[in-house]
Image: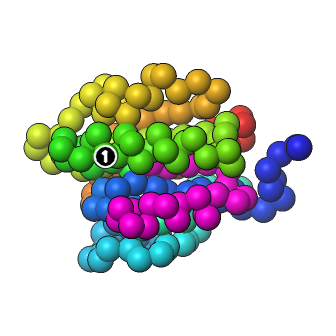
Amino acid sequence: MGARNSHRTPQVLILGLDSAGKTTLLSYLLTGHPMATSPTIGFNVGSIDLDKKNSLTLWDVGGQRTLRKNWKYYIDDVQALVFVVDSTDKERLPEAAKALKRFLSEDKVEGLPLMVLANKKDKPNSMSIREISDQLNLPKLEDRDWQIQACSAEKGLGLSQAFTSVNKMIKKN
């Protein structure tokens, strides 16, 4: 089987429910500042340079309920998954957990490293990393390298560290 697609820039799939902050996150990484976004119908894509030798191509896929069934069509050639959660949205966390579980059951994502980004951690009333991790059943994930990290897509907090970690997870995988 060999390494997936090691000859070119690693592809990273960014998923999560609508309004979790995926497009804001991508636009911050690409431009260095937040931009006004609207719901993503389909996908946004961009490449980021982590340092002189490492870059990643990021695919931000729409998270509305009607679009989630299409997530599986973006899996080919992906080396890592990033799942973005709105850490202020307690009510929708079970829905996020269900969407993540369903996606992780796809054959093609077996063994892919997973980075969960607890977005909007700079906002009041955001849930703790442990709370989010437990709600998403991350500790029960076996046969998969995973991490969870707090971030703020609006302020750029934690983003470069998160994607540097994603790159390390890809190399390790």
In the picture, which quadrant includes the C terminus?
top right
Q: What is the magenta range?
A: 63-83
Q: Quadrant of the N terminus?
A: top right
Question: Hey, which residue is sitting farthest left in the picture?
Answer: 124
> Toward which corner of the image does residue 67 lie, by quadrant?
bottom left
Local crowd size for mark 1, using a 10 Å CA cut-off: few (<14), some (14–19), many (≥20): some
Circle 1 residue: 95
Secondary-structure class at tag 1: helix
Residue 49 quadrant: bottom right
Residue 156 position within the rendered picture, expressed as x and y whole percent measured from the top left: 34, 56
Q: Is residue 7 left or right of residue 94?
A: right
Is residue 157 shown in magenta?
no
Queried whether the magenta region covers residue 67, the answer comes back as yes
Residue in the image at 47% along x and 75% along y: 42
Observer-nearest of 44 and 25: 44
x, y percent for residue 133: 36, 30
Left or right of residue 47, residue 148 in this image: left
> At 52% from the left edge and 65% from the top edge, which residue is drawn?
70
Viewer-side residue, 50 vs 37: 37
Query: Based on the displayed image, in which of its 4 quarters is residue 127 positioned?
Result: top left
**Is residue 69 toward the left or the right of residue 172 in the image?**
left
